[in-house]
Amino acid sequence: MCRGNVKASSHLRSHSKMGTDCCRLSDVWKLRMLELLALDAHIHRTKNSNFHIQQVPRIQHPKNSWAHAEFDSKNIRLIVYQDCERRGRQVLFDSKAVRKIDETNAQKTSQETTVKTYRNACLVSSNGKYTVSSHSSCSSTPDKKEHLPRYQYIRPASDVNMLGEMMFGSVAMSYKGSTLKIHYIRSPPQLMISKVFSARVNSTSVSTSTLQDSFEVISNESSLGRQCLNQNNLGIFHLYCGRLLPGASDAGQLRFIRSASFFAAHSTPVDMPSRGQEDKDSGIAHSASLSSLLIPSFPSPGSSLSGGSSSSYQRRWLRSQTTSLENGIVPRWYTEETFSMADESCSSNPAIVRRKKIAISVIFSLSEKDDANRHFQDFFFSHFPLFESHMNKLKHAVEKAMISCRKIAESAQRVQFYIGRVMDALGEFRMIVWNLYCAPRITEPVWLSMMSSTSDRNSLCQRFLKEFTLLLEQTSKNQFLAALLTAVLTYHLAWVPTVMPSDHPPVKSFSEKHASKSVDMLAKSHPYNPLWAQLGDLYGAIGSPVRLARTVVVGRRKELVQRILFILTYFIRCSNLQENLLTWGVRTDEGEQVLAGSDITTALEKGEVEESEYVVVTVRNEPALVPPILHQPRSDTRLCSVPESASPKDNPAGVKVRTTHETSIKENCELCIPTSLCLDNPQSDPMEVVSGDIKLCREQNSPQQFVKREIVMNVSKAGPFNIDGFPRSENRFSETELCGESVTRMSQHLAVKSGSLDRASPALPCPKRSSHRSPFVQRVKFQIGSSLSPDSDFESRRRDIDAKMHEFQSQHGSRISSCQKTSMSASLIKRGNFTQDQYEASGVCSTSQRKKTICYSRIPSCEAGASIFDEYFIDSTGDETLLQSGLSSNPCEQFKALNETENYQIKPLPKADRTLHSKHQDKNSSLRTADFCKEKDIMGSIKHAPHSGTEKKVAFPSKKIIPRNVSSDSALGDSDDENGTQEPTPHDTSQQEANSEQIPLPLPRSDVTSQPNETNFGRSLFGGYCSTYLPDFVLHGTRSDEKMKQTLMADLLHTVNHPVLDEPIAESVCIIADTDKWNVQVASSQRSVVDSNKIGQDALISSLVTSLLQSLLQLYKLNLSPVFCMMHLEDQLQEMYLKSKMLSEYLKGHTRVHIKELSEVLGIESSDLPLLAAIASTHSPYVAQILL
Amino acid sequence: MNAIVGLCHFCELHGPRTLFCTEALHAPLPQGAGLGDGLGQGEQAEDEEGGIQMTSRIRSHSPIDGTVDSSSPGPKKSDMCEGCRSLESGHPGYISVDKETSIKYVSHQHPNHPQLFSIVRQACVRSLSCEVCPGREGPIFFGDEQHGFVFSHTFFIKDSLARGFQRWYSIIVIMMDRIYLINSWPFLLGKIRGIIDELQGKALKVFESEQFGCPQRAQRMSTAFTPYLHQRNGNAARSLTSLTNDENLWACLHTSFAWLLKACGSRLTEKLLEGAPTEDTLVQMEKLAELEEESEAWDGSSEEDVKCNTKNDLVEGNKLSKCSTDASLLSECSWNEAPTRSAVFRSLRHMRQVLGASAFHVLAWHVLMGNQVIWRGHDQDLIQSAFDVLKAMLPVGCVRIIPYSDQYEEAYRCNFLGLSPAVQIPPHIASSEFYVLVDVRAATRSNLYPVLFVDDGPLSKYEFVVTSGSPVAVDRGPTILSKIEAALTNENLSVEVVDQCLICLKEEWMNKVKVLFKFTKVDSRPKEDTQKLLSILGAAEEDNVKLLKFWMTGLSKTYKSHLMSTVRSPVSSESRN
């Protein structure tokens, strides 16, 4: 019936064939790239003949991330739904309920089908009587008629009811504009994207009723499908025998309505330096509309940027501002996009508009395989603008089909027409999506590859230049390359910011260009969408007015086309995207991280240096719920917080370091732990291990100096700060002093003293100290920031405390006893008791505990050490870094930090710990009493040391993190002690900054793991040699321009009407380079070509480009090194930029360009003007106004 | 990320309610907007403007005192039950400041901004009672330009006292940038799913313990005939805090939401390249570095000051061409009103007018060729201005100035030399052809200059005599000179255009210099090749070659060392063919 269907289906068929082919294509391409040199040699040999097309053997399994045979375009389903106030919902179309009956295989189909046909009317007679070509342009091929498919409706799918609910929602929305929705259906896995429009129904007397009726189920016409008839049955065209709509004109005239305010938001603050609007006579045909499209210079400091990337910067800044939520929503444009159900010609009476909504949904059935499923989803969501654009196209086609089918009087015919048209559109959509997803890609875009890999740069330069110069020689006579490059440089403008001279010194070597710092900072302070920015870059939409460009290379010689594509990927540029996985870690005051709920894997690894084994710990999956770092009114001392945080069961918070950190962690964290301890795991009896260790300790742990040395080395390794976290002999004195005095004074002392790192006095026997000792015997490397056995960590930590107490006691026993005698305070006595208890109760195991602690506490310090490298802390103030480093490795600093936060809370020991350490009950209890007394101490110290309080906290909120009841479990088990935790202390409220009446909570520290992002446009929109013309790709090659000729103009117009960039587009342009005819043409949405032989206008050849190419070729021939040639090329591009600067300066004072003046001075010729003006439009928006 | 994250609840008594919202507040101006030294400014601006703006916003709408004005968007207290509430009334909310990015994350039960309130409210209603999600739990996206775009994930929380033993919640993310939001779908889904899992986990524990203590189901079965509503009345409004038994839940959610916003906003970053700095920039940076080193060696304590000063100097120097032209513009404009200005050259064009075309040609030729340019006269300002104007013709690296001296300085020390009138030029110099001397003398006649320049009052009292050892220069010259002269001659071209023009020309020729340097100094190619190269570069004429050779001395060390080290060995790269 419809010839178009044949076309579409044959397309589909050919594409599925191409699916197998495309792998081959990419193979070919890859292999070709690999064997380029050999090939080149070959070509050199055959130079005088024409282009040699190499036969390349296939590779069986190419790695092409884009070829996913999994995807079947049949998995795309289209549903059109109507929701009418009066009549409820009807399905107007469901591709799942449409059966195609090809005449040729009609019989077969009918045999297969057991589904009842819905209506007689759908069973179209086979004589082709109702055939209406859906492509009027192709209607001249009558011989295809026999194969035209017929369609019939079958029983609607069972899920349409539900889908309708999803599309429209359960409550009608009064919003008039279009609504976008995406649903994920779990089983079977499907992704549904819907657009809901208000229907714009013609309200003239003729159509009010008939139009509506025509799409609704008319049950009285036929009783055949009655059993299926309900609200959700597929709507069928009413056999409408009334007359056609009067004045029905070509549906092609239909277009979406856009209100006059379409550009309003953009036209307001246009800042035109030195020139007003007086250039009306400058010969700009579109000046009125275009001027409103010029990028307004938002009143931002960015406009004064003299730096390299001002235009990129501007664009991004603007985007972040226009999509800002902060001060309420300002709709950027009012897309009163409606669904036309009637010709515009009769929509004379808009007063009577029925409340009717039309939803168009596309459903992607996803693979059951996780991999394929995720891959498609990643692709879909990252490439959503393109999908949406095609959906708009689809909607347009449905609109058209609905309207134009009404011209057909006979109902069956009309139904066929309608279905045929919609199926055609769906076929087109499927094909485009399939191609978008599966078409061959250029695996190694030159610019992006050069940008990302430094190691390969030399060979890449060489390869590029080989190709380039070879082509240059090939095309020297016809100026093909010069014309192509002129066009590409004129329209794909993103290269301009990459040559704008920067103000900063080069980071590394000279040739390595450097990233724009200002843009980088913008991204941090005002996050925008880098994917969007990249898409704009690729399409060259960075000038003013915004123009969107694509390039297609056409030719039968695949090798040649691919060669050209390869070259162009150097000139069509965009930013490189990186994916950052931010992981948070709660830094406790020791710099350790709270650990729990993580997926921890451990592995033993041979040490590189010593004969020891390393335990490699990998932690995955940080918990999503970030524990807040609360400011508690009560004290929470190290002694109790440590066990708490150490217990994984009680803490969902996680330590998280990705395996990618491996190397850095390796460098930074050379932990020295006895292997025996690390092998210790939760299952084993901790006491056993302890006893096993005792000997070890006894034997080897006596000299503390040994320990010291080890530590210093490690810590200095861990960060830029060489911290001697070790107690020196004089510190010992301070300890004893402490004991002799009130603890209050001690902490005061600490708070004051702790500012200096090397005077760090471990006056408090806080467990952190233990982290600095006893690295001996064997080394254990913690790759990732947690220990293998958190339980034993806790245990060991506990024991370490004991050990320290023990040590402390043994060293200063006399002083302590004297302390007790003086009986400073109850707390102090308690404390003394504690230490003595420890001394008596756990004399032996304490030693080993100390040893074991390293397992735990060293890790976080290393983590934190690594974090010093973290950019997030680099720019912190000196104070901050001090604090930071202290947090990481200095016990006193940590104490100070604790002190500063003023929020300590007594934490009872978590349950798990209690059970685990039942053997140490008495110890635990003594610990607790110690907690209490310490709490009091600290409270006291706070009173005496107000300077260390909240102001610091305000300054560095995120730096102070107190290990806290992070988990539900602990809250569950032990919530009795934590009440009123959210109440700010009087200190807090009184000292808060003016703008924070809110309670300040620090953000957790973040670790960034970066990896190259794969599903970005830079990797996906450089197409290879495709079987057909494709409208999405920034660049691709194809065999012939046949299809392009048909659809190009519509594509260009569509691009302007439905800009993928979500911003107004002034013009859409396609550069077509035909290697068969050796010509380059530029098709534009603004110019329709009169000459039928041409697709667009011939591209100009800029003399600047010509001379650039010539000098490059000559230099290369003179055997200058490829890298240098590339540098020269960049220099020359920079020259172009500078000339455009001059031109823009010149245009400030001139309405007319006197070419002679320019050429005299700068060698600018008239052929250069469009190029230079385009370049200038990226940095000086007013240029367009003058020149266009 | 410029988004609002919220937690919504479908209250059995009150319908959909927003429980908790976290907004990201950004500084009104981008950081580092001024580039380089702009960092401080940006921060300042943020502290002042941003602080004020944000505080005023927060204050004006803050329901803190409990004296919520009638216009305040929040629902009336009577409409709220425990289940509809997150923070207690009077709770100030939470704030987290990301120092690095100066983004503030603020949490309240409702956004304070009235418009945002309704946006969030609408999103909440749509999320919980309009949009349909298959299975009721799961992600969905919806939205439009007017109400913003929403990513919503609905979920149940166990509640032993609720109908069906569960309550319905959703976490929503609202943005105006729909592309950004959709791009972030997989990320958001993962993270939000994680948050939900943990919330559900917590609630499940509570649920189980409650069931253990007092099995509701059995109880309900036993009282099956009592009206349901009546039964649940007492406990209908359980807060999420009690459902999860987590006192710190809201603080926790604040941190989690803030973290989510931060992580999502920095999930993707782009590397955007800029062009290499121009040679002039590089040379200036090198000079700065040298000065720093010197000052370091000098005195450690005053190092900072020196650095600052030199930096400022250089920054000024960097913009000098611009500044000077601006100044000259100004002075030109105000010339008539203030004729008593000191005698200075304002621009090359001005100098050309004063000296006359031919004298200027000779002078410029020597300048470009690197010959020593000596100005001799009383007026130091005048001579300084002459050098400032003339040096614009040369790359920064080629300029060595001794502004004023009482004795002759050798050419290797300076190519611009100012001398007091009494100083004699040594004979070996005077006899050479590698210098040009400009004598600034008092004018003998007032009508020395054409009428055109009558307004050049201060300068008209001088006459300038240009002497040169080299007679060759006059008729021919390097290509760049004729272009410069063309630009200067053409009065249509403004001073700015001429400046840009000079920059272009210099860069163009410096690029040739680079090639020549690479060719001759790095690769040490034979002479024939060099000749070929020069003709490729369009610089085969003698004067051009001379110029290139002189300019080569102005290449930055950075560039040279780079060429020497990395781009070297064409042989090795050739061998890869």
Image (cartoon, rainbow, N blue to C red):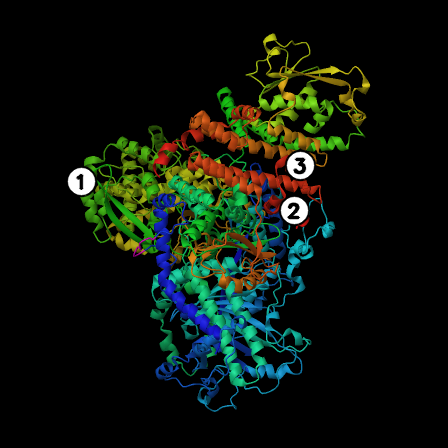
Q: Is residue A833 at all visible to an observer of this figure?
A: no
Q: Secondary structure at mark 1?
A: helix
Label 3 sits on what residue type?
Val
Counting from the top left corner in percent of width and height, residue A1118 is at 44, 33
Observer-side mark, 2 or 1, equals 2
Q: Secondary structure at mark 2?
A: helix
Residue topped by disc 1 = A695
Tell me the residue at 43%/62% (across/down): A435
- Output the chain of dot 3: B
Label 2 sits on what residue type?
Val
The numbered dot on residue B497 is: 3
Q: In whole angstroms, how far apart are the C-alphas of marks 1 and 3?
A: 85 Å
Q: Nearer the viewer, residue A596 or B446?
A: B446
Placement of B8 over or under A610, stated as above or below: below
Observer-side mark, 1 or 3, equals 3
Residue topped by disc 2 = A1183
Question: Which residues are the magenta region?
Answer: A55-61
